[in-house]
Image (spheres, rainbow, N blue to C red):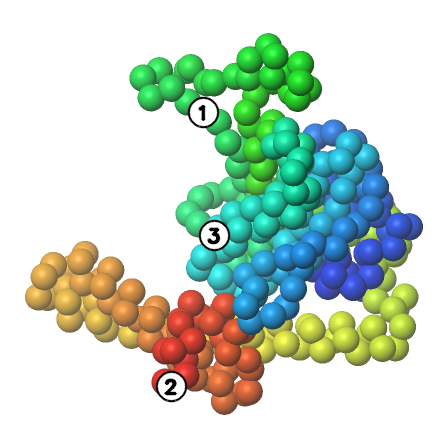
Amino acid sequence: MADLIRFDWAIKRILRNKADYCIVEGLLTVLLGRQIRIKSLLESEGNKETESDKFNRVDILAEDEKGELMIFEIQNNRELDYFHRMAYGTSKVLSEYLKEGEPYEKIRKVYSINIVYFSLGQGDDYAYRGTTQFVSMHDENDILKLSAAQRKAFGCDMPSDVFPEYYLLRVDKFDKLATTPLDEWISFLKTSEIPITFNAPGLPEARERLRVDSLSDEEKKDYHRMMENLRYQRSVIKTGREEGREEGREEGLIEGRKEGRKEGREEGREEGRRESMIQIAQNMKKEGLSISLIVKMTGLSEEEINRL
C-alpha cells in the first residue's frame, strides 16, 4: 500500500486545484447525504493568521453550485474553546457574504465541517451533526416550521434549513471496522491509509492523487517537517498528561482524606491537569514555540505564559 499524505496537510496545500475538487466533494457528499459539486474555493476575510484574528483561520471555504457555503476546519492540537471557534467562524462567513444593503433573506446556508484530532466534548460517537430547531417550551413534539409564504420564498421547510449546520468528526474516537462510506472516510482521516476495498466517494481519487511520492522535493520537505512537529507536540502533551495524572492521584488522595474520596479525586485531577498544562507551556517556551501556539495547546492565558 502506497504511503499517502495526511488529509489535514493536503487540504491546506494541494487540494485547491479544480482537478482535485472531487476528493473534498466526496467527503461532503457522504456527510450531507446528497451529491455535492464545488463551484469554487473562496478566500474568506476571516482567513487570516494575525494575532488579532487568530481564532478563525479557515482551512477551506467552498461554494457549491447552489450558492451554499462549506467551511472546512481541521484542528490537531487541543483547543478547549473550539466550540466557540466554530460559532465564530460561521458568524464571520455569514456576515462577509451578505453585501451591504442586501435583505437578510440573501444570507447563505453555511455548513461547518470540523475535523478534530483530539478529545472534544463528552460522547461515545465519532461523528455528530448540529442544527438549529425551535422547540415548544410546553410540548417537545411541537417544532416550529416556516410559514407557507416563507417556504415559497426561501425554498425550504424548516428554520434549520436557514441556520448554519455543523458537522463534528472526532477522528481519534473511531475504533471500529469500516462498514459505511463515512466509516471509510474517518478511517482514512485517522490512518492516512485507503485499502483497495474502500470505495466511498472521493477515496479512489485520494488513493491516486495523495501519494507521498507524487510531491515535489520542496513539498516533501514541508510535509515531513509538519509530521515531525506533530510528533513533537504530541510527545509533549503525552508527557504532561502522565505527569498531571500522577499529581492528580496524589492530590486526590490528600483531599479525599479531608473532604471525601470523590471530591478529592476530582479536585486533584483538575489541579493535576492545570499543572500538566503549565509544564507543557514551559517545555514549549524552551523550544521557542510561539506564544499563540502555546495558548492554543494549553488553554493558559498569554499573561500566565509570559510569567513562566
- Residue 130: image location, x then y, percent: 53, 36
In this orientation, does residue 205 appear?
yes
The residue pinned by badge 3 equals 84
Nearest the viewer among 136 and 227 is 136
- The answer to whether residue 68 is left or right of residue 289 is right
Q: Amino acid at mark 1?
A: Phe
Q: Residue furthest top?
A: 148
- Residue 79: image location, x then y, percent: 49, 61
Q: Would you place residue 299 above or below residue 187 in this image? A: below
Q: Nearer the viewer, mark 2 or mark 1?
A: 1
Q: CA distance from mark 2 to mark 3?
A: 27 Å
Residue at point 44%, 79% (across, down): 281
Which mark sits nearer the N-terminus, 2 or 3? Answer: 3
Task: Tell me the number on the disc at residue 134.
Answer: 1
Q: Amino acid at mark 2?
A: Leu
The residue pinned by badge 2 equals 308
Q: Quadrant of the C terminus?
A: bottom left
Secondary structure at numbered mark 3: helix
Q: Residue furthest bottom?
A: 286
Which mark sits nearer the N-terminus, 3 or 1? Answer: 3
